[in-house]
Amino acid sequence: MSLTLGLLLGCQKTLIFIILASAAQAQLLGGAGTSSGFGSTSVLPPPSCVTKGQTLRRGACAAFVNYFVGNSQCGSSGQTFANAVRNAPQPSAECCSNALDFVSNSCSCNDAVLNSADLIDWDEDSIQCVARATLVSDVCDPGKNQYNPCGS
């Protein structure tokens, strides 16, 4: 029974991924922007943002991102949040480059990224928190010259 349930759950995730990929391909062909809770923004095609999100979650930023997934400090602001970022594993230059690319291309508010987040074990709050942490990080943005087109 549990084997059957496991197979069904695996098929469900595969089907969700196929549906998201098909929707992303349709958007690529149509060239439309994405609307999010932050207003209408023109963003990179979803597959690009989804790939960037997967790279953040599993690549050079894994330790930095993992620190913020489900972290209660994500709800804090100002100096409290800045201190949490300082206590996080320090991101590498590659991680910062990937994270800044993700943030500056509006990927943290991209519907395809948000809709597929659970497939790579993070959620919208964690995605937003990582975007904020990237910009607060003295390693990734020492001059505080970057901004998040998705807001906050």
Image (spheres, rainbow, N blue to C red):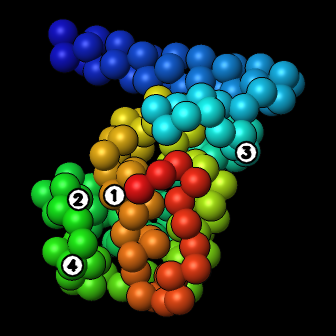
State yes or no: discs 3 and 4 in contact (Cβ < 8 Å).
no
> Is label 4 in a helix, a strand or a loop?
helix
| Label 4 to label 1: alpha-carbon separation | 15 Å
Q: Residues within 10 Å of mark 3 (few under 14, many from 20)?
A: some
Residue at 26% across, 14% down = 5
In the rendered structure, which disc, 3 or 2, sits on the residue that comes first in sequence?
Answer: 3
State yes or no: discs 1 and 2 in contact (Cβ < 8 Å).
yes
In the rendered structure, which disc, 3 or 1, sits on the residue that comes first in sequence?
Answer: 3
Q: Residue furthest left?
A: 72
- Of the residues shown, which amino acid type is indicated by label 3? Leu
To which residue does mark 4 refer? 79
Total number of numbered labels? 4
Q: Quadrant of the N terminus?
A: top left
- The location of residue 91, given as percent across then percent down, is 43, 81
To which residue does mark 1 refer? 129
Residue at 24% across, 72% down = 78
In the rendered structure, which disc, 2 or 4, sits on the residue that comes first in sequence?
Answer: 2
Q: Quadrant of the C terminus?
A: bottom left
- The location of residue 112, given as percent across then percent down, is 56, 32
- Disc nearest the viewer among 4 and 1: 4
> Is label 2 in a helix, a strand or a loop?
helix
Judge by depth and name the residue closer to the eye, 145 or 114. 145
Judge by depth and name the residue closer to the eye, 29 or 55. 29
- Of the residues shown, which amino acid type is indicated by label 1? Cys
In the rendered structure, which disc, 3 or 4, sits on the residue that comes first in sequence?
Answer: 3
To which residue does mark 3 refer? 44
Q: Residues within 10 Å of mark 2 (few under 14, many from 20)?
A: many
Residue 128 visible (yes or no): yes
Residue at 36% across, 85% down = 90
| Label 3 to label 4: alpha-carbon separation | 32 Å
**Label of residue 74 in the image:** 2
